[in-house]
Image (spheres, helix red, strand yellow):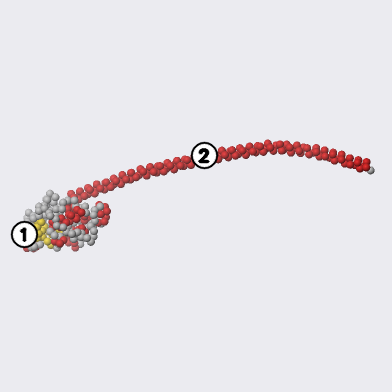
């Protein structure tokens, strides 16, 4: 019985051994294949690592290139910006002197033009313009444009008494010649009651007896020439003294009934203070004085009568 059991066990053991060998033979190619596969894997991993390193290096190079390109672009942009700012700055600097020079030239031209106009007006002797219409320039505009003094409104100037020469300076104020029936040029265009005396005036020649009989005590003498008083104005009494000297043939407004020479002297002083009259205060209404009066009248919106009238005296603050 024992022998049988031993025999069976031996057979079983041999079978197991044989099966194990067969199993080992079958599994050996698989192990070799796995070994080969494992051997190949390190090589593949090594290759993959190199690829990754190569990709990383490529990326670094590309990033470096991009950084360089960006830096170059930024530098170029800064250069262009600097050039643009520099050009603009130089342009502005160039414009400032050019603009200043142009403005200075324009101001100088205007100044010269104004001086020529003033000399021309003085040469004309203050003749009235063709239309006789007042200008639209106000006293404030005139003061701003010419820098002349402005008389304060509501503060009339006090009349002064001037010590004038006994004999007129005919070189500065030449004598005018008598013309029978002469009228004042342009007076037909001067509207208003205050200018009626100018529209109605005409030169008359009468002897001494006639003047005395019509005006009596309303006659005064200035530089030896007789003037008669009527409606608030002094007029030359042509013929009273045939050799009488007159620098102006026309009405002269007289406030407070001051004699003609004192009225003229006060007007000259007022115009002198405001920069219009640059001559001597001599009480003669010659070409220089008439020109200054005409300039003042044009600048203050008055009719250009070129003589002393009530609106002009009121504007000057005298009457």
Q: Is residue 219 left or right of residue 276?
A: left
Q: Is residue 196 depicted above or below 34 in this figure?
A: below
- Which residue is at 26% across, 56% downward? 140
The image's mark for residue 208 is 1
The picture places residue 185, in percent across and down from the top left corner, at 17, 56
Sequence-wise, the earlier of marks 2 and 1 is 2
Quadrant housing residue 243? bottom left
Q: Nearer the viewer, residue 146 or 204?
A: 146
Q: Quadrant of the C terminus?
A: bottom left
Task: Tell me if label 2 and label 1 are in contact, CB under 8 Å.
Answer: no
The picture places residue 206, in percent across and down from the top left corner, at 7, 59
Name the residue carrying label 2: 68
Res 217 seen here:
yes
The image's mark for residue 285 is none
- Which residue is at 20% across, 60% downward? 156
- Which residue is at 24% across, 49% downward? 114
Name the element at disc 2: helix
> Label 2 neighbourhood size at 10 Å, few (<14), some (14-19), many (20+)?
few
Farthest right residue? 1
Res 125 seen here:
no
Q: Quadrant of the N terminus?
A: top right
Q: Is residue 70 depicted above or below 306 in this figure?
A: above
Q: Is residue 312 left or right of residue 224?
A: right
Q: Nearer the viewer, residue 233 or 8?
A: 8
> Label 1 neighbourhood size at 10 Å, few (<14), some (14-19), many (20+)?
some
Name the element at disc 1: helix
Farthest front residue? 2
Whole-Å distance between the Cαs marked 2 and 1?
A: 114 Å
The picture places residue 179, in percent across and down from the top left corner, at 11, 55
- Which residue is at 26% across, 48% downward? 110
């Amino acid at each position: 019985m024992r022998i049988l059991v031993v025999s069976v066990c031996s057979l079983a053991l041999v079978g197991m051994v044989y099966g194990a060998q067969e199993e080992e033979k079958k599994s050996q190619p698989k192990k070799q294949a796995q070994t080969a596969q494992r051997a190949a894997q390190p090589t593949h991993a090594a290759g993959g690592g190199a690829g990754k390193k190569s990709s990383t290096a490529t990326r670094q190079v590309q990033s470096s290139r991009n950084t360089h390109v960006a830096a170059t672009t930024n530098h170029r942009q800064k250069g262009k910006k600097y050039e643009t700012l520099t050009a603009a700055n130089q342009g502005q600097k160039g414009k400032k002197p050019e603009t200043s020079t142009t403005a200075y030239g324009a101001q100088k031209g205007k100044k010269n033009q104004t001086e020529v106009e003033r000399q021309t007006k003085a040469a004309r002797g203050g003749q009235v313009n063709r239309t006789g219409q007042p200008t639209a320039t106000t006293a404030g505009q005139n003061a701003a444009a010419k820098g002349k003094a402005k008389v304060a409104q509501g503060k009339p100037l006090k009349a002064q008494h001037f010590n004038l020469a006994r004999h007129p300076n005919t070189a500065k104020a030449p004598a005018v010649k008598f013309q029978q029936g002469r009228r004042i040029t342009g007076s037909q265009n001067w509207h208003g009651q205050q200018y009626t005396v100018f529209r109605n005036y005409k030169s008359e020649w009468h002897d001494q007896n006639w003047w005395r009989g019509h005006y009596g005590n309303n006659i005064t003498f200035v530089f030896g020439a007789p003037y008669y008083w009527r409606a608030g104005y002094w007029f030359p009494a042509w013929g009273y003294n045939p050799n009488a000297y007159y620098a102006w043939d026309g009405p002269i407004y007289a406030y407070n009934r001051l004699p003609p020479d004192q009225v003229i002297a006060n007007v000259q002083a007022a115009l002198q203070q405001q920069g219009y009259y640059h001559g001597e205060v001599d009480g003669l209404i010659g070409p220089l004085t008439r020109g200054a009066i005409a300039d003042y009248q044009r600048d203050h919106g008055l009719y250009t009568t070129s003589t002393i009238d009530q609106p002009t005296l009121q504007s000057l603050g005298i009457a």
